[in-house]
Image: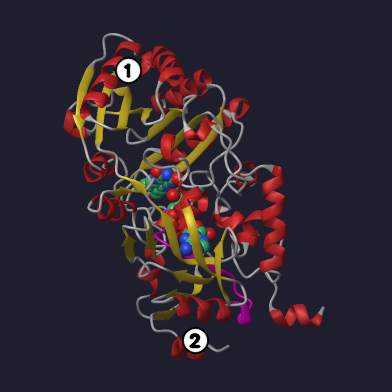
Amino acid sequence: MHIEDLRIQISGQVIAEGEAGFTAAREELVWNGRKPQATPRVIVKAASTADVQAAVRYAAANGYRASARSSGHNWSGIALQDGVAIDLGALNSIAIDRLARIAEVGPAAKNLTLAVALAAKGLAFPVGHCGNVAMGGYLLSGGFGWNEGTWGPACHLIDRAEVVLADGRVAMVSETEFPDIYWALRGAGPLFFGIVTRYWLRLMPLPSAMAVATWTYPLEQVADVTAGMKRLANVLPSFAEVSLSLAAAPPAAGMGDAKFATVILTVYGGSMIEVTGLATNVGDMLPKGALVHTPVTPIDFAQLYGLVDQSFPDGGRYGVDCLWSEDADATFAGLAEMIATAPSVRSNAIAVIYGRNSALRRHLPDAALSMIGSVCGIMHGTWGSPEEDAANLAWLRSGMDALDPVTTGRYVGHADLARPHRMDACHSATARQRIKDLAATYDPQGVFAGRHLQEPATILKNPAALAAE
Ligand SMILES: Cc1cc2nc3c(=O)[nH]c(=O)nc-3n(C[C@H](O)[C@H](O)[C@H](O)COP(=O)(O)OP(=O)(O)OC[C@H]3O[C@@H](n4cnc5c(N)ncnc54)[C@H](O)[C@@H]3O)c2cc1C
């Protein structure tokens, strides 16, 4: 298929390498200020499912890889590949059926927009922790979001999805239609062998009361704080989340480069009395003498995002990695050591212990999301200029390597996928093999970039070369 034929078929925009607007469109594919080297031959800004179908057929016919981009928030920037980049940014619609408790969302619908629209109707969904991340890659990765202790991973609330397959066909995917694709849809992440153009999501009632409270300690006290969090993990109800932030104070606090360990309690309860009582009990189980304690404060989703998003400003250069573990002491100590020695004072880590009542500790449905631990650590290396890349990436990678002895796996949404074989740790061996087998069935030619992430040695073959074999 010639590119001019593609232009005729597309209601969105086709921008070939070298054409006006190409550089800006390429930059926009990845949110991280630190972009991969790859350069697509063609960027298709899709305006409809039909556009995505045409773009996939064009890629297949010309021997290019097709790569989907919803909001470009994958930390490793993998939406930017050679070949045909399919930018789904315009597919961001949200329609809520309040009675059926189903939301129909485009892959580029964002966490904050969805949470606010749902809250207005008394509904909720386990949206991710940062406002501007889109549903597309979030749900495909598994989706660990607000109130996950009660609601579980977001992908298990996908009712059905519209998926464009490698031959350009559209498949409606659910528990009963294409159940094997539905299995992969929930956790395959970038290895998924199709492009999701629409999701239907099962919704939850909005919690009647939400609140946060914090306790801040010197970073050096991380071992005591970890002990307190382990005690809490045994007793907290599923609707209370405790996470640990390891970071310098924001510049506005005027505390220089000093680093802190802050316990953040987020509660989604039935009433403020219940929430306040719980916060008091939590405080009693943490070390005494917090430097700063923010008492329990009512909050809504929009305010929650306001608090979190300031740690991840647009334009920053990020290098991120993560681990699942069963060893909270070693994980939290290792992350604290990394923060203490970080070349950039803006870097920060989040660490969580999933308590015994958390939905994440229960048996998860059979799906590609197959790797999880009771302890999670995420390191966000954050800096400002390209000159700092080398030192910060070396710090990130050596620090995470030091945690290898206690690492049991990684989350595909946060893993440092630029490193060889990082993807291997993101799924169980059985799930990895099943994704590979399904990809071979549904994408035999290797049109989607995911085929190559799992199996870097496989080179996409031009149809003419295939025919000649
Ligand atoms: C600031 C920030 C906060 C985050 N917070 C959380 C969090 O709280 N919880 C959590 O679980 N994760 C979180 N993440 C990780 C994030 O969910 C994943 O990296 C996810 O891939 C981002 O989605 P995206 O649609 O922007 O992906 P993109 O960068 O657009 O795409 C990445 C890859 O995903 C695949 N993909 C994306 N969209 C589609 C689609 N529609 N169809 C098929 N394949 C697609 C493609 O393989 C693509 O290469 C966060 C990331 C950032 C940057």
Q: Nearer the viewer, residue 381 or 125?
A: 125
Mark 2 closeness class: few <14, some 14–19, many ≥20 residues within 10 Å = some
Report if the beta carbon of the residue with label 2 is closer than 8 angstroms to ligand 1: no
The residue sitting at 59% across, 64% down in the picture is 449
Q: Give, as a three-letter code, the residue at label 2.
A: Leu
Mark 1 vs mark 2: give the one in front. 1
Quadrant for the N terminus in the image: bottom right
Q: Does any atom of ligand 1 lie closer than 8 Å to the CB of label 1?
A: no
Camera sees residue 37: no
> What amino acid is labelled 1 in the image?
Val
Q: Residue furthest top?
A: 288
Q: Position of residue 27 (x, y in %)?
A: 38, 64
| Along the viewing direction, whichever of 84 and 431 lies nearer the viewer | 431
Q: State the residue position of label 1.
A: 282
**Where residue 24 sits in the image (x, y, percent)?**
35, 69
Q: Can you name the residue that lies furthest to the right here?
A: 469
Distance in Å between CA atoms under marks 1 and 2: 59 Å
Q: Secondary structure at mark 2?
A: helix
Report the magenta residues as a range: 60-75
Identified at 51% across, 54% down, the residue is 140
Picture disc at residue 212 = none
**363 versus 177 height, above or below:** above
Q: Position of residue 122 (x, y in %)?
A: 26, 49
For label 1, the SS is: helix
Residue at image mark 2: 6
Q: Position of residue 256 (x, y in %)?
A: 23, 26
